[in-house]
């Protein structure tokens, strides 16, 4: 009986560690791709970003970084699906007033855009390319987001 009371806390601690390590290593951030070529863009114009690429928005002096695709369940071309699916992208917005604002934008297959208002700016996502194909898995390096940023009036 004493053995059970001694080992039970150890087993619980080990289980918590296993869960913590699993969550940590399944983080959606894609730190292996190092696309460091920033793109200089203007407010109110659409532009494209690849994974881990930053858009420097002028004259607002803000940065937006496309960090990762956290979900792509869109129905692949050439297939029939019960649900059309969606694509979810993770971004970071850095302004002079606020750094490290993480947010997701989600496009359903029947939507033309997704919008998020954050720190005085409106960020719109118009598309995520490429669209999935049934014959091959899309490499994370191929994803490109088309978006725009404007000041909120």
Image (cartoon, rainbow, N blue to C red):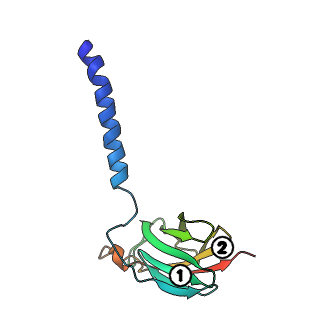
Dot label at residue 115: none
Q: Residue furthest top?
A: 1
33 vs 88, left or right, is left
11 vs 69, left or right, is left
Q: Which residue is mark 2?
A: 121
Percent position (x, y) of residue 55?
51, 80
Percent position (x, y) of residue 28?
40, 61
Q: Residue furthest right?
A: 153
Disc 1 is placed on an element classified as: strand
In this rendering, does residue 67 appear at all?
Answer: yes
Disc 2 is placed on an element classified as: strand
**Looking at the image, residue 111 lies above or below residue 37:** above
Near mark 1 (Cα within 10 A), the count class, few <14, some 14-19 or many ≥20, is: some
Percent position (x, y) of residue 33?
33, 73
> Looking at the image, is mark 1 or mark 2 earlier in the sequence?
1
Q: Quadrant of the N terminus?
A: top left
In this rendering, does residue 72 appear at all?
Answer: no
Q: Which residue is mark 1?
A: 56
**Looking at the image, residue 19 lies above or below residue 25:** above
């Amino acid at each position: 009986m004493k053995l059970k009371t001694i080992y039970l806390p150890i087993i619980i601690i080990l289980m918590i560690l296993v869960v913590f390590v699993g969550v940590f290593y399944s983080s959606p951030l894609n730190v292996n791709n190092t696309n460091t070529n920033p793109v200089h863009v203007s407010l109110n114009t659409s532009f494209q970003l690849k994974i881990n690429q930053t858009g420097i928005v002028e004259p607002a002096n803000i940065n937006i970084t496309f960090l990762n695709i956290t979900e792509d369940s869109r129905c692949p071309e050439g297939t029939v699906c019960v649900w059309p699916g969606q694509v979810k992208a993770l971004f970071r917005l850095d302004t002079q007033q606020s750094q490290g604002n993480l947010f997701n934008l989600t496009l359903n297959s029947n939507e033309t855009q997704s919008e998020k208002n954050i720190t005085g700016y409106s960020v719109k996502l118009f598309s995520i390319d490429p669209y999935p194909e049934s014959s091959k898995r899309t490499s994370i390096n191929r994803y490109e987001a088309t978006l725009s940023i404007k000041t909120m009036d």
